[in-house]
Image (cartoon, rainbow, N blue to C red):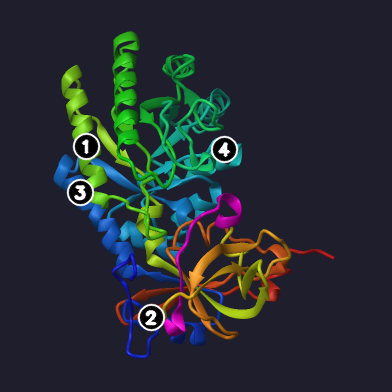
Amino acid sequence: MFHSDNLSINEQNHLTIGVHDAVELAKEYGTPLYILDEDMIRKNCQAYKEAMDQYYDGNGLVLFASKALCTLYTSKLVAQEGLGADAVSGGELYTLHKAGFPMEKVFFHGNNKTRSEIELALELGVGHIVVDNRYELDLLNEVAGERNVTQKILFRIKPGVDAHTHDFVKTGQIDSKFGVALENGEAFEIYAYAATLKNIQIDGVHCHIGSQIFDVDPFHEAARVMIDFMAQLYEKLSLKVRILNLGGGFGIKYAPEDDPLPAAEYIQKAVKTVKKLTAEKGMELPYLVFEPGRSIVASAGVTLYTVGGIKEIENVRTYVSVDGGMCDNPRYILYGAKYTAVLANNASAQPIAPVTIAGRCCESGDLIQEHVMMPKIKVGDTLAVLATGAYNYSMSSNYNRLPRPAIVALKGEEKKVIVKRETYEDIIRNDVL
């Protein structure tokens, strides 16, 4: 019934997450509530790391894409599992640092890094900065010069590869706000220029072609394009770059029809391509980096809601309202993201009619899912939305001055609040009369 092996149904016909009853969790901590299965996150981290060790002799690094879920707790967790981290803001850098993360294993991304963020990155000893554009390169060289340091960098390259995903999460095509393009010579020119800068050490190439990708072929094509470019840099500039970072974007199962590959298979197939192409060109194997985020934490998350008003509009639709919505999960209103919803207090009940799950925000578009088949639902029921561990808390907001939910982490029989539920006092904390 469920597409994640940590979910089941107990004797009370309640949804269970690991060994925990979802209905009891909702009663104990209140709703809306983010639940996070720590055991599953660790298992996913280990699957990526073991695949890299097995198929590439450990000659690389798996980074957790912090933007998927950045908290002190998750930062410490992925560090314990031996992963690096991908950060895209000063706030993510600061969170990683405060969690005790080894900052030399951090790659700092972003298409418009500020001076203060670059200064923070250098102060914290970030291992690599993935430079997006010429302006940022000059700014970084200037700031590094002021500190009399040399900063290791990669450039973000647009490889011109179609990722076969939603337009809003495609990032590898020439018409993208991210990175420098190959087609117009922009990428080659910026590498040539960077090689002349005193406080810059060029260490690699990076690309990221999109998110929620099920097809392996785009990754093969991205690897081919990037390796060709690495060879060109050596042939024309005598520039030998060490790192090939192929980004992330591996898909997960949100709905029954989704069919992602296991993490190890993504790594295995990508590694096979890299080995084949570099051998053909007589190149040394690069230090290989991947940046999974969603595929590490998404399926480990469940959001619990309490059902409120139910509005049946004859011959139109039935709205089932919950006590959360776009404030804790904006992904449906952003790009029609699919989710699976379960009636947690009657988990084996058969679906009988389509409903639209509506949030409580003052927006017509504040919906969780539309026209999904569900069992009979009544006021006070506990509704669980699955696979919400990635980009839900990260994208949450205080729209309508709604406090963000708590996050509770489960580890075996243990449970722990890792992010406190916000209060109304938290909402006005920075207001000034």
Q: Secondary structure at mark 1?
A: helix
Of discs 1 and 4, which sits in the foreground?
1
Q: CA distance from mark 1 to mark 3?
A: 10 Å
Check whether the beta carbons of the residues at disc 3 and disc 4 lie within 8 A of each other: no
Quadrant placement of the C terminus: bottom right
Check whether the beta carbons of the residues at disc 3 and disc 2 lie within 8 A of each other: no
Q: CA distance from mark 3 to mark 2?
A: 36 Å
Q: CA distance from mark 1 to mark 4?
A: 31 Å
The residue lying at 43 percent from left, 44 percent from top is 211
Q: Which residues are magenta?
A: 331-348
Residue 43: image x %, image y %?
26, 62
Callout 2 environment at 10 Å: few (<14), some (14 to 19), or many (20+)?
A: some
Q: CA distance from mark 3 to mark 4?
A: 33 Å
Residue 263: image x %, image y %?
27, 51
User: Label 1 sits on what residue type?
Assistant: Val
Q: Is residue 8 visible?
A: yes
Residue designated by label 3: 51
Specify whether 308 is left or right of 75: right
Camera-side residue: 276 or 127?
Answer: 276
Residue designated by label 4: 113
Residue designated by label 1: 271
Q: Earlier in the sequence, mark 1 or mark 4?
A: 4
Q: Is residue 245 visible?
A: no
User: Label 4 sits on what residue type?
Assistant: Lys
Specify whether 228 is left or right of 206: left
Residue at the outermost bottom position: 12
Residue designated by label 2: 348
- Residue 355 is inside the magenta segment: no
Quadrant placement of the N terminus: bottom left
